[in-house]
Image (spheres, rainbow, N blue to C red):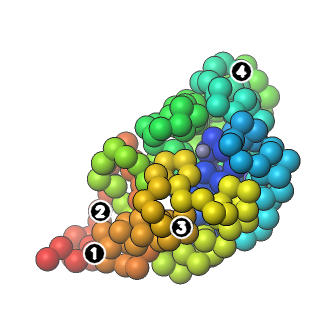
């Protein structure tokens, strides 16, 4: 069982999109996990076996309690009944309170599908009579990771990942087959600098939105609640 579960399409997606957030959640004493929907077997670089080894190495750096791979078909991911059922079973087994999903935009079709598939499975996992194994469980909170998106959407909030940023880079470096000598990956389009530098530039920009060195941005469909306006953080002017 985990407190925070990131569900993404390919091994390394979660590290890019919310690696710092998962590290910070672990620092705060929460059990964290990543569910990779596919093994990334159709990726340009590496093989499914190499990527699996890299993913386990990255899991250790992130301090994950669990990392599972559903082995759904890479580059052909579908929000099908079969895929939803497999994911419902995994959610019922892991019982996360918070789920992090890719925002259903992005270039890679799997990234778009993963956001919708993840959301639907979180809902269906709570239906008592949904016909599959496991006790019903619905995560309380769904967060969409919106880092590196080409679509500009104001984040609902930014997680301060300053204390985690070096460890996030270390986790990303575990993906040697994906990372070495590469200038862009996934939703991170090349900008003429090495990939770690590019991640640094983006995460520093998100950090600046909350007046901190590094951050990761999230969007929620629902509105955030505030109790005490006098205690509100982040300088306006
Ligand atoms: Zn991906």
Report which residue position mark 2 lands on. 226
Q: Is residue 62 visible?
A: no
The image position of residue 140, as x and y in percent, is 53, 47
Q: Earlier in the sequence, mark 3 or mark 2?
A: 3
Crowding at dot 1, Cα within 10 Å, few <14 / some 14-19 / many 20+, comes out as few
Q: Is residue 190 left or right of residue 67?
A: left
Kindly report the distance in space between the C-alpha atoms of the residues bearing marks 3 and 4. Answer: 39 Å
The image position of residue 208, as x and y in percent, is 32, 73
Report which residue position mark 4 lands on. 82
Q: Earlier in the sequence, mark 2 or mark 4?
A: 4
**Residue appearing at x 50%, y 34% in the figure:** 112
Beta carbon of the mark 3 residue lies under 8 A of ligand 1? no
Regarding mark 2 in the picture, which secondary structure is present there?
loop
Beta carbon of the mark 2 residue lies under 8 A of ligand 1? no
Q: Is residue 83 left or right of residue 24?
A: right
Q: Earlier in the sequence, mark 1 or mark 4?
A: 4
């Amino acid at each position: 069982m985990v407190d925070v579960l990131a569900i993404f399409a390919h091994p390394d997606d979660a590290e890019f999109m919310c690696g710092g957030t998962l590290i910070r959640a672990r620092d705060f004493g929460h059990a964290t996990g990543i569910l990779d929907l596919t093994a990334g077997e159709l990726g340009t670089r590496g093989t499914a076996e190499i990527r699996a080894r890299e993913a386990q190495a990255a899991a250790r750096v992130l301090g994950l309690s669990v990392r599972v791979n559903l082995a759904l078909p890479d580059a052909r991911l579908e929000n099908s009944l079969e895929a939803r059922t497999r994911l419902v079973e995994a959610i019922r087994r892991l019982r996360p309170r918070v789920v992090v999903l890719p925002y259903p935009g992005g270039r890679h079709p799997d990234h778009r599908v993963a956001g919708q598939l993840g959301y639907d499975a979180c809902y269906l996992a709570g239906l008592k009579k949904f016909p599959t194994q496991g006790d019903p469980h619905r995560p309380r909170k769904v967060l969409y990771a919106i880092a590196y998106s080409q679509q500009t959407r104001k984040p609902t909030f930014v997680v301060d990942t300053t204390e985690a940023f070096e460890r996030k880079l270390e986790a990303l470096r575990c993906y040697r087959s994906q990372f070495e000598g590469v200038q862009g990956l996934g939703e991170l389009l090349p900008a003429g600098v090495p990939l770690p530098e590019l991640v640094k530039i983006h995460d520093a920009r998100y950090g600046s939105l909350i007046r901190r060195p590094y951050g990761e941005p999230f969007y929620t469909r629902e509105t955030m609640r505030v109790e005490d306006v006098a205690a509100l953080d982040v300088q306006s002017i």
